[in-house]
């Protein structure tokens, strides 16, 4: 992304980092770019999937228990598809042809264990999963990517709700 952004794009992105909800006029005042230029740049960045808007929720609301998973074996493409669309997965890294590392979170260790069970069940052929538990800071902000509460639409209509809990947050007061 760094190579394809010019100075104007960087000012625009910096403005969005400061406030992701301003209108085009407010961005224009901050960046010095014309509203038309801003609109065109935003369309270009979004069409190239270099800029995506997603809601962020605090770990205090969604759960601050976390785990680092090292997964050996399994069908890598299936694992990646599952993990890249799961709201409980914070990030995935391909280590080599046969290993993935993922950071996941949940309300408690039981919820994380449930997620690991789903991953094992759906991807099959996993040789080993190494789990290291920890905590996220309460003010850590978690992006939610998948708006399908039962997750089945991303998994070839395999309904995994019975295995995997609903990860969309309840927005009632705590």
Image: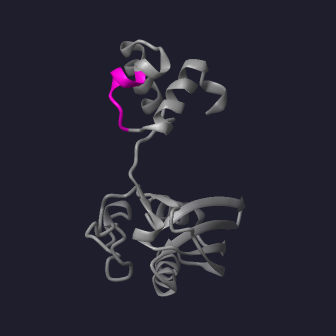
Q: Position of residue 92 (x, y in %)?
A: 60, 60
* Closer-to-camera residue (132/153): 132
The residue that appears at 61% across and 25% down in the rendered structure is 4
* Above or below, comparing residue 32 to residue 67 in the picture: above
Residue 100 sits in quarter: bottom right
Image vertical order of residue 124 relative to residue 2, above or below = below
Q: Residue furthest bottom?
A: 110
Among all residues in the image, which is located at the extreme right? 96
Magenta-colored span: 21-27
Instruction: Please report the residue visible at 57 percent of the width from the left and 70 percent of the height from the top.
Output: 136
Picture mark count: 0
User: Does 101 appear in magenta?
Assistant: no
Provide residue 170's location: percent of width, then percent of height. 29, 70
Can you say whether 64 is above or below 40 in the image? below
Judge left or right: residue 43 versus residue 104.
left
Question: Vertically, is 42 above or below 36?
Answer: below
Q: Is residue 149 left or right of residue 144?
A: left
Point out the residue furthest to the left here.
172
Q: Quadrant of residue 146?
A: bottom left
Q: Nearer the viewer, residue 11 or 163?
A: 11
Residue found 49% across the figure and 37% down from its top: 18
Residue 124 location, x and y as percent?
A: 54, 77
- Asked where in the image residue 130 lies, by quadrant, the reply is bottom right
**Coloring basis for residues:** one colour
Residue 7 appearing in the image: yes
Q: Quadrant of the C terminus?
A: bottom left
Is residue 49 visible in the rendered image? The answer is no
Residue at x 61%, y 78% (from the top left corner): 126
Q: In which quadrant will I find the N terminus?
A: top right
Q: Nearer the viewer, residue 16 or 112?
A: 16
């Amino acid at each position: 992304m760094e190579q394809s952004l010019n100075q104007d794009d960087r000012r625009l992105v910096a403005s969005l980092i400061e406030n992701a909800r301003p209108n085009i006029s407010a961005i224009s005042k901050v960046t010095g770019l014309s509203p038309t230029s801003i609109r065109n740049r935003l369309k270009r960045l979004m069409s190239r999937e270099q800029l995506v808007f997603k809601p962020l929720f605090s770990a205090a609301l969604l759960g601050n228990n976390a785990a680092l998973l090292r997964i050996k074996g399994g069908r890598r493409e299936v694992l990646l598809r599952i993990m890249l669309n799961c709201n409980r997965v914070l990030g995935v890294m391909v280590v080599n042809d046969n290993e993935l590392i993922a950071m996941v979170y949940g309300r408690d260790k039981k919820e994380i264990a449930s997620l690991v069970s789903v991953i094992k069940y759906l991807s099959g052929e996993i040789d080993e999963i190494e789990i290291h538990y920890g905590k996220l800071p309460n003010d850590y902000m978690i992006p939610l990517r998948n708006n399908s509460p039962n997750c089945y639409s991303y998994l070839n209509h395999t309904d995994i709700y019975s295995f995997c809990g609903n990860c969309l947050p309840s927005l009632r007061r705590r």
